[in-house]
């Protein structure tokens, strides 16, 4: 998706009341903005490899190595660690999301 959100996507949906099915083309940014208004939906929407928040694709902010520590019952006391490379994505509004690489 371009920064202007001009890419078209195919949207399909079914009415819960009459079971009428609809399918048409729409701008991805418009679809994301509409879905963002639905309270029970996730606030981050994925189109292909793009994460959308506030109706716009999130920009890659930085690359990090996240270190997660956990207790392993079989190894006795002490902590074990796992390193996980992640991408930090940031929305224009300041919202931030870390996704595994």
Image (cartoon, rainbow, N blue to C red):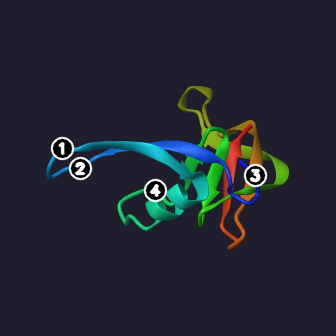
Upstream in sequence: badge 1 or badge 3: 3
* SS class, disc 4: loop
Q: From the image, state whether disc 4 or disc 3 is nearer to you.
A: 3
Residue denoted by label 1: 19
Residue denoted by label 2: 15
| Relative horizontal placement of residue 16, taking residue 48 as reference (left or right) | left
Residue denoted by label 3: 2
Tell me if label 2 and label 4 are in contact, CB under 8 Å: no
| Relative horizontal placement of residue 17, taking residue 95 as reference (left or right) | left
- What residue is at 58 percent from the left and 52 percent from the top? 28
Quadrant of the rendered image containing residue 72: top right
Is residue 92 positioned above or below 48 on the image?
below
* SS class, disc 1: loop
Residue with the most extreme left position: 18
Tell me if label 4 and label 3 are in contact, CB under 8 Å: no
Mark 4 burial class by Cα count in 10 Å: few <14, some 14-19, many 20+: few
Residue denoted by label 4: 42
Q: Which part of the image, by quadrant, shows the C terminus? A: top right
Is residue 9 positioned above or below 90 on the image?
above
Upstream in sequence: badge 4 or badge 3: 3
* SS class, disc 2: loop
The Cα–Cα distance between marks 4 and 3, rounded to whole angstroms, is 22 Å
Front-most of residues 12 and 59: 12
The Cα–Cα distance between marks 1 and 3, rounded to whole angstroms, is 34 Å
Upstream in sequence: badge 2 or badge 4: 2
The Cα–Cα distance between marks 2 and 1, rounded to whole angstroms, is 5 Å
Tell me if label 2 and label 1 are in contact, CB under 8 Å: yes
The Cα–Cα distance between marks 2 and 4, rounded to whole angstroms, is 20 Å
């Amino acid at each position: 998706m371009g920064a202007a959100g001009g890419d078209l996507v195919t949207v399909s949906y079914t009415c819960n009341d009459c079971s009428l099915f609809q399918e048409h083309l729409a701008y991805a940014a418009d679809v994301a903005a509409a879905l963002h208004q639905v309270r029970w939906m996730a606030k981050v929407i994925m189109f292909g490899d793009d994460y959308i928040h506030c109706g716009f694709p999130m920009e890659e902010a930085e690359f990090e190595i996240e270190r997660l520590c956990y207790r392993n019952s079989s190894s006795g006391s002490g902590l074990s660690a796992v390193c996980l490379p992640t991408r930090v994505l940031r929305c224009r509004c300041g919202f931030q999301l870390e996704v595994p690489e």
